[in-house]
């Protein structure tokens, strides 16, 4: 049953773009994807809990590698050997791509109503101690309830860029020039002689303001003063009144 991708599902697994969920198995998840050349593929991914189990991860990777190097042996004998050794059945689809490591996955061609990548998840879960069937005490894997796909760790940060010899020389020359200029400016500001005369400043321009020419004034007429006798004939006495006690010259 095809269901949409859910939160936590990877959009890409290797070169394959995932489009939907095909199946949720006890040991992992199966996705419907598309190859770069347009082929429809089935991709099986272990759950994060199963990927942390070294034995479960080894059974998954071993089943994939056995399918890649499988010989032409067919029939009941091959199926029995596969069951005894914990390998997949001989009708497993061909492997297109795989990746082992801490988050393994496998991609096979998608066939509607046919075997898909879920065949590689079958040998991951075991319930007995002999041949993978009920021939021993039952036990349950601690990761059976996990439904989170195992994803590879994000790539680390890229290494710092390595500068070429030419760029290092240019940067060193520029830095030395800037330091020298800074020292020169500091020396000029701090150690310049105080007795050094300052350059003469130019005098300001003289501004001439013209004054108005003088205007001639006519003298005012003198008023007649009374004489010694008190007569106001308008004639002035050449002698002052207080010279002879007001009597005039003898």
Image (spheres, rainbow, N blue to C red):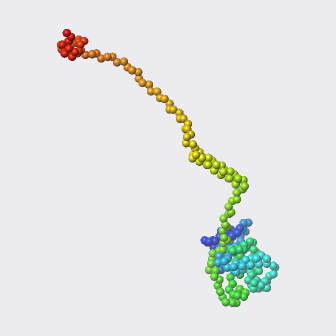
Q: Which residue appears at 21% of the width and 10% of the height?
A: 249
Q: Which residue appears at 80% of the width and 82% of the height?
A: 74
Where 215 falls versus 17 (above or below)? above
Image quadrant occupied by the N terminus:
bottom right
Q: Which residue appears at 72% of the width and 72% of the height?
A: 99
Of residues 154 and 31, the one drawn nearer to the viewer in this rendering = 154
Percent across and percent down for residue 168 are 70, 54
Image quadrant occupied by the C terminus:
top left
Q: Classify residue 128 as left or right of residue 218.
A: right
Work out which residue is located at the far top of the displayed protein and give it. Answer: 250
Q: Is residue 19 visible?
A: no
Work out which residue is located at the far right of the displayed protein and give it. Answer: 72
Of residues 214 and 159, the one drawn nearer to the viewer in this rendering = 214
- Image label count: 0
Q: Classify residue 209 as left or right of residue 200.
A: left
Of residues 52 and 176, the one drawn nearer to the viewer in this rendering = 176
Q: Classify residue 219 as left or right of residue 155.
A: left
Where 226 falls versus 152 (above or below)? above
Q: Which residue appears at 70% of the width and 90% of the height?
A: 135
Percent across and percent down for residue 48 are 65, 76
Percent across and percent down for residue 221 are 28, 15
Task: Locate residue 132: give its quadrant.
Answer: bottom right
């Amino acid at each position: 049953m095809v269901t949409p991708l859910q939160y936590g599902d990877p959009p890409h697994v290797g070169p394959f773009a995932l489009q939907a969920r095909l199946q949720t198995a006890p040991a992992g998840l199966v996705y419907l994807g598309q190859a770069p050349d347009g082929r429809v593929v089935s991709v099986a991914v272990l759950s994060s809990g199963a990927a942390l189990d070294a034995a479960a991860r080894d059974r998954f990777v071993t089943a994939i590698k056995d399918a890649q190097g499988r010989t032409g042996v067919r029939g009941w004998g091959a199926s029995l050997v596969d069951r005894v050794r914990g390998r997949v059945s001989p009708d497993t689809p061909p492997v297109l791509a795989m990746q082992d490591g801490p988050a393994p996955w496998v991609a096979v061609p998608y066939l509607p109503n046919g075997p898909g990548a879920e065949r590689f998840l079958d040998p991951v879960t075991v319930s007995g101690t002999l041949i993978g069937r009920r021939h021993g005490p039952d036990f349950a894997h601690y990761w059976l309830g996990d439904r989170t796909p195992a994803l590879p760790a994000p790539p680390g940060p890229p290494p710092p860029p390595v500068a070429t010899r030419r760029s290092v020389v240019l940067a060193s020359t520029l830095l030395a020039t800037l330091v020298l200029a800074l020292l020169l400016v500091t020396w000029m500001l701090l150690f310049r002689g105080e007795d050094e005369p300052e350059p003469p400043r130019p005098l300001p321009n003289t501004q001439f303001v013209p004054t108005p020419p003088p205007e001639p004034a006519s003298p005012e007429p003198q008023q007649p003063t009374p004489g010694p006798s008190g007569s106001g004939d308008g004639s002035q006495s050449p002698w002052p009144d207080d010279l002879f006690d007001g009597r005039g010259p003898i």
